[in-house]
Amino acid sequence: MARLPPLAVASGALLLLFVSVSPCRAVAGGGPSSVVLPVSKDDATQQYVTMFRQRTPQVPVKAVLDLAGTMLWVDCDAGYVSSSYAGVRCGAKPCRLLKNAGCAITCLDAVSAGCLNDTCSEFPKNTATSVSTAGNIITDVLSLPTTFRPAPGPLATAPAFLFTCGHTFLTQGLADGTTGMVSLSRARFALPTQLADTFGFSRKFALCLPPASAAGVVVFGNAPYTFQPGVDLSKSLIYTPLLVNPVSTAPYGRKDKTNKYFIGETTIQLKGRVWREKSTDYFVGLTGIKVNGHTVPVNATLLAIDKKGVGGTKLSTVSPYTVLERSIHQAVTDAFAKEMAAIPRAPAVEPFKLCYDGRKVGSTRVGPAVPTIELVLQSTAASWVVFGANSMVATKGGALCLGVVDAGTEPQTSVVIGGHMMEDNLLEFDLEASRLGFSSYLPSRQTTCNNFRLG
């Protein structure tokens, strides 16, 4: 028999019962004070990849890091074998806490991690390709290291970590060898909150993204931010509030007049109200932009989030480069070109518009010798200064391009700070205090993400 979608099927349609309650507070428990994930950069996709251990017996799992998403999802089609997985029943508390969860009544294929009856269901999404589907929510063993240097280990184990089963087609467009995505969002069952609930540490994490051929780290919980050679950033971060977009930027799919949603080839009959949740992405209050200390004229309305959730500034590890609404992009590139008037231009290299002859640009400890870009966050006291290493992109042809991309005239979000701009910067996402802490470019302090030490 041909394989059918591994959720309830009735007359060719998938029947999901939607339920909701308000989330509860996290409950503290025993365990380590912190756990870590190693991070590397995939050259082909520009995605950031991590590895953890899962299942019984345990196996290493590679996945792409994502500051968005609702929870960890893993491909359960391609040989998911474990003696310790269990489905989350439709009436169970975790299912009730997920406002837009559904219930898979019947699965017509062989029983497996991705095909269970009376199981809570959710919509895992590949945020790199914007492809989504429906999948079972299950639990299984998950282990993360508690030290980073000199070597990862020993492991801290969550015996029943909740995640979603995705399907093999959902991994298309992800880095080679990865089988899912790790959500670092503020969602109830993303890693930061779920690990804090499991091990009893604070709901915060620090992210240090590496450039290619280097190592980075994600640190969950209460740990000093110590880097070789003896650089402690724990007390020197600059903080700005994390903002909440009132409207989710992750739609569930295409809806028709009969109140059905279509996700790929799966038809979902909705029962009751579909909640419009707040976004779980990380937004910050960008109030202005400066190039070489000079204010760039931008439409301030675009920097604010309106009632429909449009506008504002968020951070994304899936977007390789910073993406700007068209008028903001034009203003920034014009201002940058004015400051770089003495440097010979080179032909544009997609997706960039402003490029220079790399042989004519000098080099410094903080990257190419180009004007700084200053992101003014709430006040000038909380400005994020971007140096050449994070603003410029070297291309194969020798051109050096300003690494910002035109988002068009009507993007959902006006400014998306991409991975390249965050590399070798330490970012602390404090969910309890709802604030973002950030360092300067670490090589300016004679260290890098590769030099983080915990252990």
Image: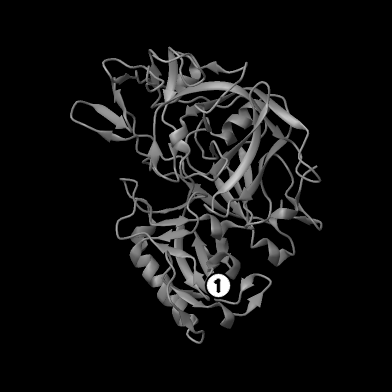
Q: Is residue 9 above or below residue 64?
A: above
- On the picture, is 137 further left or further right than 55? left
Q: Is residue 297 visible?
A: no
Q: Is residue 378 above or below residue 135?
A: below
Circle 1 sits on which residue? Answer: 372
Q: Amino acid at mark 1?
A: Thr
- On the picture, is 105 further left or further right than 200? left
Where, quadrant-wise, is the C terminus in this rendering?
Answer: top right
Q: Residue at x 52, y 28 (%)?
A: 78
* Percent x, y of residue 50: 62, 42
Where, quadrant-wise, is the N terminus in this rendering?
Answer: top left
Viewer-closest of 2 and 159 = 2
Q: Is residue 174 above or below residue 298?
A: above
Q: Residue at x 32, y 35 (%)?
A: 253
Q: Is residue 354 visible?
A: yes
Circle 1: element type: loop
Q: Quadrant of residue 218?
A: top right
